[in-house]
Amino acid sequence: MRLWHVDLIECLPRQQLLGQHRECCALRGRGWGRPHATVNYVFRYSPRMLYDYHIRVMAEMKRRGYDPDPCWLDARYRGKVLQYAPYTPVSGPLLKGYPEHDAEYLVQCLENLQRKGINLNKEIRLKETLS
């Protein structure tokens, strides 16, 4: 699994959006610090970065009518197993995102989605036009 480029969150199809939520939950829980080739970069940063990314995913889920467990809105929450195990506290405004989520990574994500038969180029252009 991967964390899709932050700019793709609001364009992701249902399956990828819900998968993103599950991935964030896993990483915030018992997966924190466990090596995984495609998401190892998240462990170089504060858990705050992952929390902020997850908040964006859950906001998009809510916008589409899904109801993620409100427990995940608490930055200290680590899932049903760990619940509130020690975690770096967070505060302040949402951060933009991971430095790895650059233009090159955006292209890689779009190509990955295209291999799955999902073409988001039109949605990305529309989003840029509206911004």
Image (tube, helix red, strand yellow):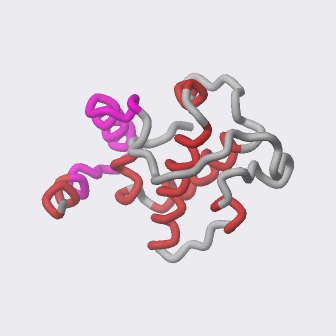
Image height check: is 74 above or below 81?
below
> Is residue 41 placed above or below 7 in the rendered structure?
above
Q: Can residue 20 be seen in this view?
A: no
Depth order, front residue of 93/126: 93
Residue at position x 63%, y 67% from top? 68
Residue 7 in view in this figure: yes
- Please give left or right for residue 131 compared with residue 30 in the image: left
What secondary structure is the magenta-colored segment mainly?
helix
For the residue pair 118 and 128, the one nearer the viewer reads as 128
Q: Where is residue 6 in the image (x, y as percent from the top left)?
A: 39, 46
Name the foreground residue: 18 vs 5.
5
Q: Which image quarter: residue 46?
A: top right
Quadrant (top left, top right, bottom left, bottom right) of the C terminus? bottom left
**What residue is rendered at 53% in x and 41% in y?**
49
**Magenta stretch contains residue 110:** yes
Q: Which residue lies furthest to the bottom in this view?
A: 65
Left or right of residue 114, residue 91 in this image: right
Quarter that holds the N terminus = top right
| Residue 61 placement (x, y as % from top left) | 51, 66
Along the horizontal axis of the image, is 119 left or right of 59?
left
Magenta-colored stretch includes residue 8: no
Residue drawn at point x = 58 percent, y = 54 percent: 21
Residues shaded magenta: 99-124
Residue 108: percent from left, percent from top: 34, 32
Which residue does the image show at 48% across and 62% down from the upper left?
Answer: 14
Q: Quadrant of residue 74?
A: bottom right
